[in-house]
Image (cartoon, rainbow, N blue to C red):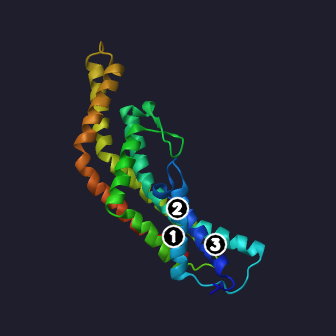
Amino acid sequence: MELALQPGMLEAFGLHAARAAALVVGAPLLGSGTGFSAYKVALIMGLALLLHGTHGEPLAHQPGGIEYGVLMLREVVIGLALAFTLHIVLLAVRVAGEMVGHEMGFNMASIVDPATGVNTPVVTQLWEIFFYLGLLAVDGHHLLLRGLDASFDRAPVGEVAFAQDMHLLAGDMFVQMFEAGLVFAAPMLVLLFTLSVLMGVLARLVPQLNVNELGFTARVAVGLVALLAFVPLLAPALSRLYEGLDVGIGRTLDALGG
């Protein structure tokens, strides 16, 4: 018994695979890491087969080379748009970590992130780990996969059409997550600012003290104690970020659907 492929079936599968690949490679949770990447290929092919079996239909016509390239570009843009939503939510954690690390003086002790190859402050790296662990604990990675599945209903393959106002949505989400980062870091920043004021007053009262050396040690010590004391506040703060991820994926799907 021969298995006959309908005309346009392979082309449609390629478009499904392109959108899945863009999400897997672009999302920090799925595409990061420097280890053996065969699992990424397996994940992409598995998602493509599953999604094509669920949503896939042969293309209505055989596209030419240029037209098919435009269709592939559209699928990559849609996949990256979904991955960008997770990047935006993670931005809140990075903004908070950068600000707190700067106030504590830990930015001088930055480490190299093996996933990106750039220097990452210690506090940022710590909070990102908590963010990823919490995201996996609440099945947040399922939000991305469900969003990918829903995107084929909102923006079916084989259409030469791009979403409208995506740049406005990205800017709005960027502002919201930057504000969320400030709120995330607010307890630590207030405490460290109070310490700076106290050190300034102490420098005026006791000029003989080496305030620079004492202040650096005090910032690190108080900051480390505060990081431990404010751990219970991480849960509600991260929960709001996960809710923001859910809302952001929904808004992205709405924009894709026009």
**Three-letter residue code for mark 2:** Val
For mark 1, does the 10 Å Cα neighbourhood hold few (<14), some (14 to 19), or many (20 or more) residues? many
In whole angstroms, how far apart are the C-alphas of marks 2 and 1? 10 Å
Q: Do the residues labelled 3 and 1 touch (CB within 8 Å)?
A: no
Taking the image as shown, residue 58 lies to the left or right of residue 142, namely: right
Viewer-proximal residue among 193 and 205: 193
Q: Is residue 92 above or below residue 124?
A: below
- Measuring from the top left, give residue 21's x and y in whole percent: 57, 64
Which residue is at 48% across, 75% downward?
Answer: 149
Q: Mark 2 points at which residue?
A: 24
Say which of 116 and 33 sits in front: 33
Q: Which mark is residue 47?
A: 1
- The residue to which callout 3 is attached is 14
Q: What residue type is labelled 1?
A: Leu
Residue at (67% x, 77% y) in the render: 11
Q: Where is residue 65 in the image (x, y as percent from the top left)?
A: 77, 73
Estimate how packed mark 2 is, as few (under 14), some (14 to 19) or many (20 or more) residues with alpha carbons within 10 Å.
many
Where is 192 relative to 244, above or below?
above
Q: Residue at x 36, y 43 (%)?
A: 126
Circle 2/circle 1 CB separation < 8 Å: yes
> From mark 3 to mark 2, how far is it between C-alphas?
15 Å
Q: Is 78 positioned to the left or the right of 244 in the image?
A: right
The image position of residue 183, as x and y in percent, is: 34, 51
Q: Quadrant of residue 90?
A: bottom left
- SS for dot 2: helix
